[in-house]
Amino acid sequence: MITLSIDAMGGDVGLGVTVPAAVAFLAKQPNANLIMVGDAEQIRADLLALNAPMNRVEIIHATQVVEMDEAPQMALKNKKDSSMRVAIEQVKSGKAQAAVSAGNTGALMATARFVLKTLNGVERPAIAKFLPAQDGHLTLMLDLGANADCTAEQLFQFAVMGSELFSALKPNRAPARVGLLNIGTEDIKGTEAVKQTFKLLKDSSLNFIGNIEGNAVFTGEVDVIVADGFVGNIVLKTIEGAVKFMGNEIRQEFHRNMFTKLGGLAAKPALNGFKQKLDPRRFNGAIFLGLRGVVIKSHGGTDAVGFAYALEEAYHEAQADSLQKIQDGVAAQLAAYQEKKVLAEQASMADGEV
Amino acid sequence: MITLSIDAMGGDVGLGVTVPAAVAFLAKQPNANLIMVGDAEQIRADLLALNAPMNRVEIIHATQVVEMDEAPQMALKNKKDSSMRVAIEQVKSGKAQAAVSAGNTGALMATARFVLKTLNGVERPAIAKFLPAQDGHLTLMLDLGANADCTAEQLFQFAVMGSELFSALKPNRAPARVGLLNIGTEDIKGTEAVKQTFKLLKDSSLNFIGNIEGNAVFTGEVDVIVADGFVGNIVLKTIEGAVKFMGNEIRQEFHRNMFTKLGGLAAKPALNGFKQKLDPRRFNGAIFLGLRGVVIKSHGGTDAVGFAYALEEAYHEAQADSLQKIQDGVAAQLAAYQEKKVLAEQASMADGEV
């Protein structure tokens, strides 16, 4: 059995989204239990109204709610009994294998770091997400906004974590193909930090396929895309904007006149298929990587369908025991990196003596 | 009359693209003349075969061609009689008001910088491009890849040049709305360089609307988007990839079965309208900004339709005398910036004496 803890009050809507999502999720996953944290009375009433299997849900009362625009440090300081924090504490105590929240990203990251701490060898946690690519391929991209300025070592750690996560979730596949997001495929391209990261990745035992450009997000040629949080977040928002823009443009074309409107009716099955394929709710659920516990961030404005996808993401990670695999992978890569560093220093010292 | 010089040999195809594009362009713009640089005999033969108005075309022979994968410094050193270089020299000498090339971007930028030099007050030239947004709006984005690591001063200069260019090309509009590409709209977001740029833009007389996120590329809420060349290039390639990916996904949905195929036939007019609207050839023609002359870079793999759009871009810039406006704008902003700097230093000195 896998238990997930849910920040039931998080997100733009709160209970109106989290409770129906929880009920749908329980119906789909018979081997899962839930802990729902927040206004206990209200949660119970909402669950009962939807005929939830109450024997599979534990309700924990929390007196506070972190606001969507609250400063992370204020939430950390003043909201010690928030639904968000208490949900994460269920992971810390081992009662839950993963926590899911649609709350304020900054506060969630700060609280998760404070409560759970980072893995050994990881300087900064990162935010990762699966993005749709050609032929149903899913591309994992990180960091999506946790860290604006990154060192080469941090980017390298993101690559290790992303590779381990991908392999944990797709155990039948060859080692994850890791690409470094850059402005050209040649070794010499990019910012100073990215050039250094290229060297670290090339020397590592990861399946590093080299620099990739922005379009590779969609081609399926790469499994894990590494970028700093500034670039990653801008790319993510650009993709969201592009999907929305193109959807609007298609709609406009079909509304141009009577003929195109009729054409639109005839094309409805295909257009609906297209819409469904790229429905952002299906890709809801960003993964906080590098913490001593699984935390999934749902989009704050999603509905019950979208939030249920975030619960699925958490469930699959807990099931795959991705955390242990990431921890082991980071430890192994770190040891190899340190060994190489010592050997390199040794070699240069020997050189000096000649 | 406006005269454009064309690197007739540039691009993946060369004459097979540049000559038909030139002929189409001359038919469309009766007030334009062309200088075509390259293999004179071949150019003449190709023009004659297409019944070009020979009295409006000057042919200048050049013995060399810069290869698409040639290192910029090698092109600069060894290809002094290349079609690319001689085309740019026509702008330097004043015979042409703008040069257009589909050649190697790095070599074109290096040659343009060497031959034309940068404007006073501009440290680094940038590459800018108009991108399609909602309701037919065009958003100018820069830098798209000329400079990977940028200082705040350089980003500020890009903003000034972009604003002046936009206003020169859209003289009837209010001052260009300038946005800084970032990972959130709050002042405190972003990398160190971006945070400093925010301050410079806020203190300037530009119509700065603040930080914008990746999706704003498509909403029409901003006219000029400022980013460093690393972020800008990745965003550009991501957009290109997204458009291609979504086009493929739609096509797949319409090919799923007999019914969707029939639906596709009925939807053809609308789908074609959509395809046309976002046809990348319509947005061909990247602008090199910050040089003492107008240079337009066409996509290397475009066809004659796309190359003709790049010629149109050059023509409109020459017609709007964008260069003079950019030069004046940069000078004015630079003077204001220096004045503020001196006053600030003065103020802090006075403070020190108290």
Image (cartoon, coloured by chain):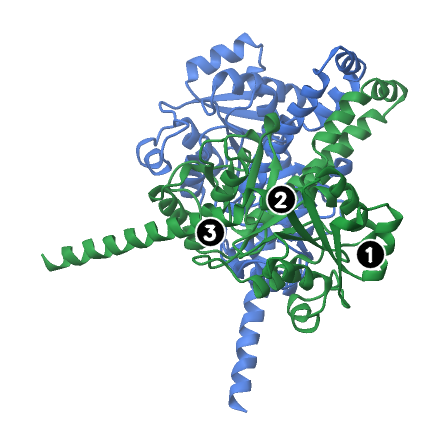
Chain colours: A blue, B green
Residue position marked by numbered label 3 in the rendering: B327
Which one is nearer the viewer's eye here, A205 or B72? Answer: B72
Q: Earlier in the sequence, mark 1 or mark 3?
A: 1
In this rendering, the answer to whether B180 lies above or below A181 is above
The span from disc 1 to disc 3 (Cα, nearest Å) is: 35 Å
Q: How far apart are the alpha carbons under marks 1 and 2?
A: 33 Å
* Image depth: mark 3 or mark 2 in front: 3
Specify the farthest residue to the left. B354
* Horizontal side of residue B55 vs A93, given as left or right: right
Quadrant where the N terminus of chain B is found in the figure: top right
Marks 1 and 3 belong to one chain? yes
Tag 1 secondary structure:
helix
Q: Earlier in the sequence, mark 1 or mark 2?
A: 1
Instruction: Name above or below for residue B131 compared with residue A81.
Output: below
Look at label 3 and name its amino acid: Gln
Question: Which residue is identified by label 2?
Answer: B236
The residue drawn where x is 58% and y is 49% is B144
**Occupied quadrant, residue B65:** bottom right
Q: CA distance from mark 3 to mark 2?
A: 26 Å
Instruction: State the image coordinates of residue B230 (x, y, percent, origin top left).
Output: 56, 52
In the image, is A85 to the left or to the right of B276?
Answer: left
